[in-house]
Amino acid sequence: MDNKEFTVSEVIDSFGINGHTWLMFVLLGLANIFDGYDFMIVNSTNTYLAPSFGLTSAAEIGSLTTWGLLGMVLGGAVGGAMSDRIGRKKMLIIAVIFYGLFTLPQAFSNSLAIFAVWRLIAGFGVGSCIPIVTTCFSETIPSKNRGVFVTFGMAFMVAGWVLAGLVAAPICTANTSLFGDFLTNSQITVASGATYFENWRICYLIGALPIIYGIILIFAMHETPQWYATNGQKEKAVAALEAIAHQHHDQNAKYDPNLLIVPPKPANVGPNVLFSKKYIVATAAIWCTYFVGQFCVYGMNAWIPTWFQNMGYTAGQSVNLQTWNNVAAILSNITVGYVSDRIGRKKNLAGSWIACIVAIVLCSVFITYDPAQSKMVLYVALMLLFGFCLNYAITAVQPLMPESYPTAIRNTGVAWCQAFARFGGSGSSIVLGAFATAFVMANPAASNPEAVAAAAAAGKELAATIPDWSIVVLTLCIPFALGFICTLLFVKETGGKSLDELAAEETASDANDTGTTLFTVMMIIVVCLAVLCIVFPLLPASIFGGVPFSKTPMALPLMAIGMLAPFAFFFIFAGPRAIKNRK
């Protein structure tokens, strides 16, 4: 390069799409596949885990998903800050090996308590991995293609979800013990009355494969030049740029470290700065919208198999319908970035919430009791539509995350956003389960002679009532509407701009404004959310007079308060500033 000052983003943009781009795409994509498998395998096997652990209540079954998500909350919060300090590569390798290592003992768990401990610990690694992948994509991809690659990268995670369903269905329903007496010789009876072996344990042995992949990353992955530059290592940043240029762009490229322009680091780099006047609107935009997406995606993935079993389908068919929902998610993840780069982040996200409302209304109206299983084609189509729209919306938030903060706090910002949103995912399976028990209808199967006979043959009696999931899913219109409102109020258009341009647009703020007070208030709100929506529902019924918390009159109002309090916080403290910024 001539004797002109330059930035890392300018050089990367000048390279365009090249071999290094595709190398990072594959490496980060594979990390997300393993990550997605690790998370979704519990949703794909919970029908079989429940009888193994003697789980009967909706709160207990819903908590199977919750423990991993809680671990992801902790992992995202800690791993994000560590990545900004020790580097993207080191932290990603640690995260991948960590969750692979602690998925292994889940295969040998014999109680909910033991399983929950291992899920919680493994979730720490999973939660650290996802934001690093998003950040690495944003720092290595040319500006005009950033949205496509960031969202396409998330398609790999959903591919891991689909893989979990494809692996779980044949393994869990096999009519023989696949591992002999070593692991799967015990038999279980699922809710439908069918009997299987505990082959679900094999799915968690497979989940340990990331240990090998983490070792591969040590030799195959490179640190991002953006991280080197921001952390005062200009020579390494230039060396990394030259290596990319020599291999894929210009054999004679040379860059002078003294001419490299690096945006100044924020005076404060802790998570509290996300709530300073400088960043609180951006924080409100991504925290609110991603929270809505996580609540709906993880809540529905946890309960879709149960929903369809109540409609007359077998456990295996119900998991397959859930898998179709996730197949559509891959298609949406591939599409969303392309559209986002062309029409803008804000329009894309706002339109996606409207599409979600339409899709959930159609599912609520047309999915009905079908013991003859004559509507399978219709239900597959509805799951494809629902999966496409819902995952399109949550993935449309992804490009906004790394574009909202400078490099010095980028992964902290991304990770804390995802960690907070997982409280929505952690509580959603429990909240929706509690909500379902509040809306019940006469069980159509109870008047079906064939269903009664099948249950009797299995030594079971059909319940007189079942949750009315048509009403439950229809209430998702409320969070979707919240997502739409928050998009209009808080989201700022960032598409097509380099990371340096976005950093230059940041308004100056008081150096003494660290955001500590508002950060503390939000943490108190998060603790209240966790207590009301996760802790209370899992406490023994004896504490609430012999009635499970979810069935007490105060349960749903308190859960609603816990879930809506963060939105009230942002409307009060970020809303006025968002309106002022538009004038």
Image (cartoon, helix red, strand yellow):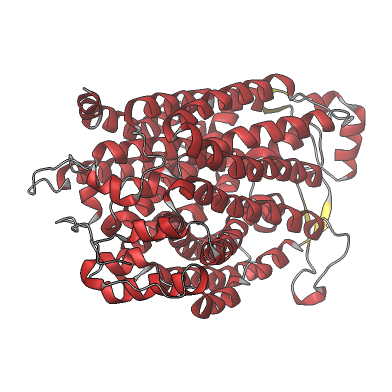
The image position of residue 345, as x and y in percent, is 44, 35
Q: Residue 47 versus residue 87: which sits nearer the camera? A: 87
Observer-nearest of 443 and 2: 2
Q: Which residue is pictured at 59% across the width and 60% down the height?
A: 38
Identify the residue at image location x=41%, y=70%. 91
Q: Which residue is drawn at 30% across and 57% down?
A: 407
In the picture, the quarter occupied by the C terminus is top left
254, 537: nearer the viewer: 254
Does residue 53 appear to the left or right of 96 in the view shown?
A: right
Residue 26, given in percent of the width and then of the height, sits at 59, 63
Could you tell me if residue 552 is visible in this image? no
485, above or below 299, in the image: above
- In the image: residue 436, left or right of residue 528: right
Vertical order, 95 against 568 (above or below) = below
Q: Looking at the image, is 374 positioned above or below residue 174? A: above
Dividing the picture into quadrants, the one containing residue 79 is bottom left
Residue 322 visible, this orientation:
yes
Q: Quadrant location of the N terminus? A: bottom left
Which is nearer the eye, 72 or 380? Answer: 380
Where residue 574 appears, as percent x and y from the top left, is: 24, 32
* Furthest residue toward front: 2
